[in-house]
Amino acid sequence: MNLTEKEAMLIEDLKTQEKTCAEKYARNANQAKDKQLKGRKEAISQETEEKNAQKEQFSKEKEMNRLS
């Protein structure tokens, strides 16, 4: 399956937005006083980073398939 240029651009935009979101949650977690809130924000940040890494891997695989 090949991605169109528009689809590839949309995935890149989503990855950028998710990276920004993860960074914000990480900053907020560092500033949180409540341990429960801090832990939840850290977890959300980590989950978002993992999803972003999955999208990055998907994009690389599709690009490699396109070039093959």
Image (cartoon, helix red, strand yellow):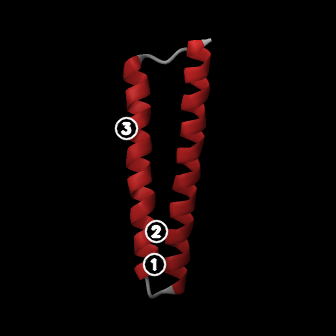
Q: Position of residue 65 (x, y in %)?
A: 61, 17
Pointer 3 residue: 13
Q: In the image, what residue occupies the spot 45% across and 59% down? A: 22
Q: Using the image, determine if residue 49 lies above or below residue 34.
A: above
Q: CA distance from mark 3 to mark 1?
A: 26 Å
Near-viewer residue (23 or 37): 23
The N terminus - image quarter? top right
Q: Are marks 2 and 1 in contact (CB under 8 Å)?
A: yes
Q: Residue furthest front?
A: 67
Q: Secondary structure at mark 2?
A: helix
Q: Using the image, determine if residue 35 lies above or below residue 62.
A: below
Q: Amino acid at mark 3?
A: Asp
Q: Position of residue 7 (x, y in %)?
A: 42, 24
Q: Position of residue 18 (x, y in %)?
A: 43, 49
Q: Amino acid at mark 2?
A: Ala
Q: In the image, what residue occupies the spot 41% across and 71% down? A: 27
Q: Using the image, determine if residue 1 lies above or below residue 18.
A: above
The C terminus - image quarter? top right
Q: Are marks 3 and 1 in contact (CB under 8 Å)?
A: no
Of the numbered discs 3 and 1, the one sitting upstream in the chain is 3
Near-viewer residue (38 or 56): 56
Q: CA distance from mark 2 to mark 3?
A: 20 Å
Pointer 2 residue: 26
Q: In the image, what residue occupies the spot 37% across and 21% down? A: 6
* Quadrant position of residue 32: bottom left
Pointer 1 residue: 30
Q: Residues within 10 Å of mark 3 (few under 14, many from 20)?
A: few
Q: Amino acid at mark 1?
A: Asn
> Disc number at residue 43?
none
